[in-house]
Amino acid sequence: MKNTTKSIRPCLPGSLKYAIAALCVVCMFRFPVAAQNLIPNPSFELRDSCPTGWHMGFPWISEGPLFAQDWYTPNAGSSDYFNACSPLVPPPGNLPVSAPVNMQGYQQPRTGQAYAGCLVTSLGHEYVESPLLSPTVANHRYFISYWMSLADNSAGACDLFGAYASADSLELLSDTYLDMFTPQVESPPGAIIMDSIGWTQVAGTYISPGGERWLTIGNFHTQAEQDTIQFNENAGFGYGPMYYLFDDVCMLDIDGTPGDFATTDTTLCGNPTLTLRGREDMHNFFWSDNSVGPSLDIADPGTYWVKSINVNTCTFAIDTFRITGGSSVPLEIGRDTTICSNQTVTLKPSNTNFDRFQWSTGSTASSIEVSIPGTYVVTAFSECATGSDTIKIDLGSNCSCLFVPNAFSPNSDGLNDKLQVGSRCPLGFFLLNIYNRFGERIFSSNDPSLGWDGWYKGAVCDQGTYFYNIHYGGDYSTSSQIRELKGDVVLLR
């Protein structure tokens, strides 16, 4: 059993409390919003009839609707319904249940003109329950929130108020505790709810197994399990009965479709950390790393998100942050180099964190191909930095990889009998074609070790000039392109 401490309850004179309430902006009507809240009558505004006295609030489900629509009691306790429609002076034999003035004191509804009230005693607790507009979805995360205020005439205060989602409604014929059920969302142990001027939020999330259709709110612990503070004793309800008011119940499927969403792209820009912030008009935040603060400090590039809850409208939004690393590294496009005629080389910055480019050729592409010797300059830009680099490309002095004789004599004397192509480079590809003066191909080979012996179709070819076309390529080249070499050769007899 936890220790029970007696103390003197701090209180305000009634006139001051009324004065504070008069300064508050009171919303008398709840405007309709997108149907995200699974609670059909979240602030107890919708009603079948107006309560006229004490203990006239929430029926058992089997009794059907009575006062606040879609709200019932799960046990034999007599939870109370307070509404501004009730008379300040009730019929004889009844106690006032109007709002904001009633038999429990003075409290403006958090929104609208109604709220519920429940006893928490050493003999048993009171609760209220409501059906959901649709069953929960398996493995979805749900946000549950409701607001509480300690009644002026409460004899004490305690902790551990929760919300319990269930597949079926609860209907117990006794007014005992519902400690056989474990609420999915609960206020922290030791956090005694004592505010009787404003409203205190109880909120949290849980992963649903799916198929839950009801929500019950109240205290799911015996008084022996609670931390309590007693202001006075009231033997009529056992030791120190406590009384709480409830308003604005919200339940959201925050793995479902949000009311709004947005994506923001930004960069670290070399900074060690960056602070991401949730929306300013929101109240509860759930980040991709499971933190729940209004902001998140990050140090690494990546994609982050936050689901922000507006408890006033019971809606949520998703904001996604796509963070790049930025760059302060100098821009480089390579060392000075040489190329040969008909050769191209690709110039591309090695640093990929820049997103805009300006080349001295006028191109704004991320890379260019050049085939003319010269000096090339690129300037690159990002949100973090500007970089620039220059490369000089000269015409190579030793660009001849193949050599072809200008004449040969296929006379079987063992000297220069074949047209043989020599190579100074390792070849990965080779194709030799020879044509006569009529453009007819008379020889073809992809083996550089073979040569043309001056014959065609079983006959020797006439003396004269013939033309060759060679396509070749290999590892010697800085480009993967196939080169072409053309020329003529004289056949001598």
Image (cartoon, rainbow, N blue to C red):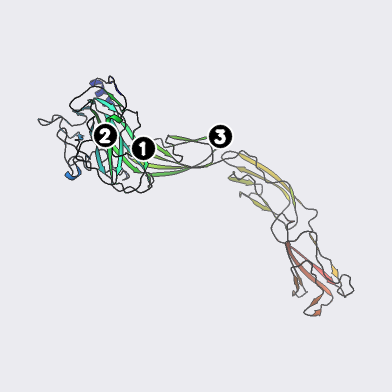
The residue positioned 40% from the left and 39% from the top of the image is: 308
Q: Residues within 10 Å of mark 2 (few under 14, many from 20)?
A: many
- 1 or 2: tag closer to the N-terminus: 1
Tell me if I can see residue 367 in this picture.
Answer: yes
Pointer 2 residue: 246
Q: Residue 201: image x %, image y %?
A: 33, 33
**110 over 403 or under it: above or below:** above
**Residue furthest out toward the bottom:** 458
Q: Residues within 10 Å of mark 3 (few under 14, many from 20)?
A: few
Marks 3/1 in contact by CB < 8 Å: the verdict is no
Q: Residue 434: image x %, image y %?
A: 77, 71
Pointer 1 residue: 204
Q: Secondary structure beneath disc 1?
A: strand
Quarter of the figure with residue 144? top left
Is 460 on the left-hand or right-hand side of 160?
Answer: right
Residue 259, label in figure: none
Pointer 3 residue: 272
Q: Residue 41: image x %, image y %?
A: 25, 41
**466 over 56 or under it: above or below:** below
Q: Please name which of the two marks, 3 or 2, marks the residue nearer to the observer.
A: 2
Q: Secondary structure beneath disc 3?
A: loop
